[in-house]
Image (cartoon, rainbow, N blue to C red):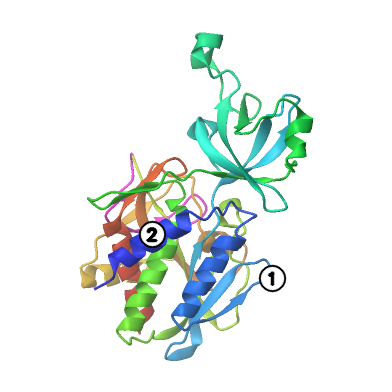
Amino acid sequence: MLDTKYMSDFLEEILAIGSTAGDTYDAVERCKKEFEAYGLETEYTKKGALIGYFPGEDEENQRMISAHADTIGAMVKEIKDNGRMKISLIGGYSFNSIEGENLIVKTCTGKTYTGTHLPIKSSIHVFSDVVKEHLRDEESMEIRLDEDVKTREDTMALGIRVGDFVFFDTRTKVLPNGYIKSRYLDDKACIAAIFGAIKYMKENNLKPAHTIQFYISNYEEIGHGVSQFSDNLAEHLALDIGTVGLGHTSDEKKVTVLAKDSRTPYDFRFRNRLATLAENAGIGYAVDVHFRYGSDASISALAGQEPNFACIGPGVDATHHYERTHIEGIENCARLIAEYALEK
């Protein structure tokens, strides 16, 4: 049996570590410690991604299983005359999804300040019905710092500068019925599933059929996550969220096996093997086609990388907004990771 409490607890821990794409160092370092706790050797890539090596029976035809530690977020774009700030989005999401959201601004020296992201015209008492019609975009919204700032100089005196990273409050809630609500389940739910599978294999003295390279990428959300491939790598299985919603088969309690995303179909035989593994092991799964979606596997394939490619992940509702999944979905994902790792 997989340890669902361990996966849930680890997920909560890494969700609390801000890791907007471009500043993922703390989250990746936490994954490094977890790999090493299970005796896996690790190395950093030149871009700061992390690889944990799980030795298998076959060293010649290795397999990569990747998930990304980076999340969507923002960066300070402009410090305004009144001391408030405009942001530039990092990753694909809408300004509507972060209205009224609490956040942290992290300076280049590591100092942090809290604040809230609001429309400039936010109070209906002040602006009347304009508040309801006000377009939410880069020009119409701003960060209100929880500091006594009235001018640009006040804000800069705190050490805040253009280019500082912004991390939004995850509002993580783990509910007694198994549902988990949070920002950034994409893709930290998959990282939790990786370590759940590793823990299961280690505790049961199970050795992968092929050496596994567990790759924690750090730029997936902006399109250049996995970039280091060894010559002996045969397959690349990316772990990313299954998008739950109208017109999709993905389910929060199941693992999604991707047939196609907006960039490319996935290899038919590879994804069919994964579906068969799930079927034979009694794992809850769904095969789905995703709209406006790409994974580290499909992006790497389009970049000309040779390993065969596929993608799976737990079903997640309201992706790139206030997301929700279920511990059963993460468990089913971890079970399929283990089945794939042990497949001859």
x 53%, y 35%: residue: 94
Nearer the observer, 79 or 187: 79
The residue tagged with tag 1: helix, strand or loop?
loop
- Residue under the point 73% across and 28% down: 80
How far apart marks 2 and 1 lie (CA) works out to 27 Å
203 lies left or right of 80: left
262 w.r.t. 274: above or below: above
Specify the amino acid type for callout 1.
Answer: Lys
The residue pinned by badge 1 equals 46
Labels 2 and 1 touching (C-beta < 8 A): no
Q: Nearer the viewer, residue 54 or 285?
A: 54
Quickly name the residue at label 2: 313
Q: Nearer the viewer, mark 2 or mark 1?
A: 1
Quadrant holding the C terminus: bottom left
Where residue 312 appears, x then y in whole percent? 39, 62
Location of residue 86 in the rendering, given as x and y in whole percent from the top left corner: 67, 32
Q: Residues within 10 Å of mark 2 (few under 14, many from 20)?
A: many
Q: Position of residue 37 (x, y in %)?
A: 46, 79
Residue at 47%, 59% in the rendered image: 14
Q: Quadrant of the N terminus?
A: bottom left
Q: Is residue 5 visible?
A: yes
Range covered by the magenta-colored residues: 246-265
Q: Quadrant of residue 139?
A: top right
Whether residue 264 appears in magenta in the rendering, the answer is yes
Q: Which residue shows up at 32% across the image and 75% down it?
A: 339
Secondary element under disc 2, as helix, strand or loop, is strand
